Image (cartoon, grey):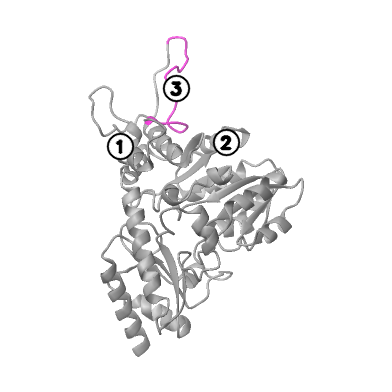
Amino acid sequence: MSADLRPETILAQAGGAMDSETGAIVPPIHISTTYLRDPDNQYRKGFAYGRADNATVRQTEAVLASLEGAADCLLFSSGMAAATSLFLALSRPAHVVAPRVMYWGLRNWLLHGAPSHGLSATLVDASSLDEIAAAVRPGETKLIWVETPANPLWTITDIRGAAEIAHAAGASLAVDSTVATPILSRPLAEGADVVMHSATKYLNGHSDVIAGALAFAAKDSLYDRARGIRSHHGAILGPMEASLLMRGLRTLHLRVRSQCAAAMTIAQHFAKHPQIEEVLYPGLESHPGYAVAARQMRGGFGGMLSIRVKGGEKTAIATAANVSVWKRATSLGGVESLIEHRASVEGEGSPCPPDLLRLSVGIEAVEDLIADLERALASAVSK
């Protein structure tokens, strides 16, 4: 499709992909694991073996690359596979700078798994460019990793400022933009080198696919090594999952905008609620990262927020126990609204206050979501 088309059009038409043989407007699913060689043993059609490549996967990658303004995109079997593959693609030994507040699974891997691979990590308050800069080790730091908005406190990192720090040190900047999605943020346009998505979340949007993505500003050596690691480790996404992901992407813009609007309404409703200590949402002007978020996010501030419940941990857990419309479940970005007591999930070392509940806003009627949370809060307090 033409490069000047808007994201909505690219998404709705799956990047223009269709079946040239039949004219079907829904692309076929290519499930073959192996491909016919040419008579001289070459693979001129570009496909050799399913562990390294697949036509359905390529189609979905092309749509994501277009959305991010990337040179290319690689899909992986999970968000963790995508993230760890990027770290493993760094030349070793390597020092990386990452946030204290980030997806807990990756933070734990950086602290406990990465050292055995010749990687060391310094965790910082990534909302502070001064802290990021102070953590950089000239000649040693190969990657600065940021997540913005950052799960589950929804802190904001200045992508442009972080990119300048990284490049001045000869390092790359990677941005976990899972919560922002390409609808709200374009990190590559802000100077980032790589964008990562847990495509399980908003990109798919239906809680039925595990997937990850890396979008690269350039097909450089880091891209080549990440692509090689994906093949060697067998971490490519399956064609069925890629097809479901493509289906989910077709409505990404509609879902994200609806979720952003509902999240803002919920944040504003509970910001001065007598039973809420604090609402953490970058769309509120009281949020310390509001000005940066307003500059680098367009069309909304995301569908995620957290609330801190008065009465502490017991009241927070009791609130989650008494919802009916909200569902007590891990994950985020689906069409259904989820609530979770993150400190219990993350365990020891979690930066989450014990009174915090993480909310992933779905596409239900916002009035029903607010009423359900109001009832749950009242029940928790009465008990």
Q: Mark 2 points at which residue?
A: 223
Residue 207 visible here: no
Which amino acid type is marked by label 2? Answer: Tyr
Residue 216 belongs to magenta span: no
Magenta: main secondary structure equals: loop
Q: Name the residue under label 3.
A: 46
Q: Name the residue under label 1.
A: 13
Residue positioned 48% across, 64% down in the render: 282
Measured along the vertical axis of the image, is residue 134 above or below residue 170?
below
Foreground: disc 1 or disc 2: 1
| Mark 2 surroundings: few (<14), some (14-19) or many (≥20) residues within 10 A | many
Q: Which of marks 3 and 2 precedes in the sequence? A: 3
Q: What stretch is highlighted in magenta?
A: 39-55
Q: Where is residue 216 in the image (x, y as percent from the top left)?
A: 54, 39
Residue 53 belongs to magenta span: yes
Q: Where is residue 24 in the image (x, y as percent from the top left)?
A: 23, 29
